[in-house]
Amino acid sequence: MDGSVLVFKGYNSGTDQAKYISVKRSQDGGKTWTKESKVGDMIEVDGDMSDDGRYPNNNWTGLGNVMVDEVNGDIMVFMTTLKTAQKLFRSKDHGKTWKMEDTTIKPGKDGWIPATNGACDPGVTIKNGPKKGRLLMPARVFVEYLNKGKNRKRFNDLYAMALYSDDRGKSWNSSEPFPLKGTGESGLVELKDGTIYHNSRTHMRPGNRRIAYSHDAGETWVDEHEDDELFDGPPDVYGCKAGLLRLPYEGLDILLFSSPGNRSTRTDITVWVSFDGGKTWPVNRLIQKGPGNYTWMAAGRKGTPSEGIIYLLAGKDWMARFNLAWLLEKDA
């Protein structure tokens, strides 16, 4: 809330290594950064989960989703594996100190506990309508936690969804599933009329990104469809986690979408711009040529050193800072 910019990192590989979450902070808009400091230790969760080799230490949590409570300024960092831990780290001083606390993440109607997957985008605080102040964040359900020991994967049955809290993060309810299975690693934003725009990786089919909307502050999803312009990938039948951001301009629905700009390889991170809440994406600009994978974005805060700055984090590789004027330069 004071304009501090935070970058988190999870350490959870190797059986003998310490498993913890760390953070770096910037108070000058990202020009300089503090040394890495510890948020807290990871924990082990119960559950018979996947033995797929891509999910080592699958009973140990990794860095999960992050969100800021715009009502009180608290920052919450979640821990997750194929299902989430019932604990989170909370900071009440802009990320300087952290305390682990219990939380309750309730299963969805199918009985599975969602994962507060760090590959999802950060959550939002609802600003409009009867649910004003609600915390809402994208999440994902790993059905049967990928069926450990059954030698088969359940990616076709995974699905994106959301978790919402009306008690400042003490407990979280599961939304209805995203209307299309095989989805996940999604992002969501609130549009100026209170509609929630949900943009998801498809993961298991060719084609572009999948879109759905909520008119009840994230409890149910309707009008699912394939986006006309934003491709999901590469590769085409697996997709790639992308970044989604609504810029904080009052009365405007300016959205940004970041993803590899190459349809055949995960390279050339590019940002697309929409001026109509995601209906069309008339502008795009290459951010950095060369290798690029998962991306996350954040916007600076008015009245602070971060005002007007857009931050893009490309996995563990690099971070870019730019503004909307730069994105819109005609000779770009």
Image (tube, grey):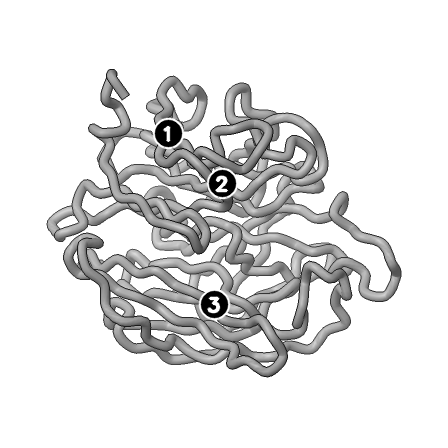
User: Nearer the N terminus, badge 2 or badge 3?
Assistant: 3
Q: Is residue 226 above or below residue 119?
A: above
User: Nearer the N terminus, badge 2 or badge 1?
Assistant: 2
Q: Nearer the viewer, residue 273 or 174?
A: 273
Quarter of the figure with residue 30 = bottom left
Quarter of the figure with residue 182 = top right
Tags 3 and 1 in contact by the CB under 8 Å rule?
A: no
- Quickly name the residue at label 2: 242
Q: Is residue 168 above or below residue 255?
A: below
At 37% across and 43% down in the image, what residue appears? 129
Tags 2 and 3 in contact by the CB under 8 Å rule?
A: no
At 50% across and 65% down in the image, what residue appears? 63
Q: Is residue 199 above or below residue 161?
A: above
Q: How many neighbours does mark 1 have within 10 angstroms: few (below 14), some (14-19), or many (20 or more)?
A: some
Give residue 223's position: percent from left, percent from top: 59, 28
* Amino acid on which disc 2 is placed: Ala
Q: Nearer the viewer, residue 328 or 80?
A: 328
Instruction: State whether residue 257 appears in this view.
Output: no
At 50% across and 62% down in the image, what residue appears? 64
Quarter of the figure with residue 289 = top left
- Quickly name the residue at label 3: 10
- Quickly name the residue at label 1: 286
Give residue 44's position: percent from left, percent from top: 61, 79
Residue 181 placement, left or right of 92: right
Q: Nearer the viewer, residue 288 or 118?
A: 288
* Amino acid on which disc 3 is placed: Gly
At 43% across and 19% down in the image, what residue appears? 280
Q: Nearer the viewer, residue 161 or 266?
A: 266
SS of the residue under disc 1: strand
Q: Is residue 72 above or below residue 179?
A: below
SS of the residue under disc 2: loop
For the residues labelled 3 and 1, the Cα–Cα distance comes to 28 Å
